[in-house]
Image (cartoon, rainbow, N blue to C red):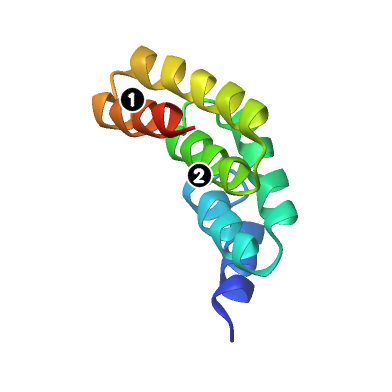
Amino acid sequence: MSRRIRLEEMLASDPDDPFLHYALALEEVKEDPQIGLRRLESMNETFPDHVAAYFRRGQILAEAGEVIAATQVLNTGVQVARRIGDDHAVAEMQGLLESL
């Protein structure tokens, strides 16, 4: 059984687990980045304090050359990370922003 299928089964049992959504999004990105991006965007709405979803979404957008969208996502992620006190995430996202 693939990792993606196992994650989908676990998510069916626990649909409110942000870690499962994030893990599934990472698997989806490997297969189809657009599907993974949609899940990460949904996570930003459903689990707004999950800063890793902002960072990964910003990375994917940047890799796709969508600099404006990546900048918007990362700026929002920086604001969230500051609000919840995640200095490491702030530094990572600011570093990515500076590279754009």
Calculate the distance from the C-alpha at mark 2 to the C-alpha at mark 1. Answer: 13 Å
Q: Are marks 2 and 1 in contact (CB under 8 Å)?
A: no
View extreme (bottom): residue: 1
In the image, what residue occupies the spot 68% across and 37% down? 42
- Marked residue nearer the N-terminal end (2 or 1): 2
**Residue 68 is drawn in which quadrant?**
top right
Q: Is residue 13 left or right of residue 98?
A: right
Local crowd size for mark 2, using a 10 Å CA cut-off: few (<14), some (14–19), many (≥20): many
Q: Residue at x 44, y 28 (%)?
A: 97
Q: Residues within 10 Å of mark 1 (few under 14, many from 20)?
A: many
Frontmost residue, 87 versus 99: 99
Q: Which residue is rendered at x = 51% and y = 57% of the image?
A: 23
* Residue 3, x across and y down, in percent: 54, 76
Q: Nearer the viewer, residue 2 or 76?
A: 76
Q: Residue at x 38, y 12 (%)?
A: 83
Residue 9 in the image: above or below residue 56: below
Amino acid on which the number 2 mark rests in the picture? Arg
User: Residue pushed farthest left?
Assistant: 87
| Secondary structure state at the residue bearing disc 2 | helix
Give the SS element for disc 1. Answer: helix
Write down the quadrant of residue 67 in the picture: top right
Looking at numbered disc 1 in the image, what kind of residue is underneath it? Val
Report the front residue among 69 and 90: 69
**Quick one: quadrant of the N terminus?**
bottom right
76 w.r.t. 41: above or below? above
Residue at which label 2 appears: 56
- Residue 13 pos. (x, y %): 61, 59
Is residue 87 toward the left or the right of residue 83 in the image? left
Residue 74 x, y percent position in the rendering = 51, 27
Residue wearing tag 1: 90
Q: In this picture, is 65 found above or below 71?
A: below
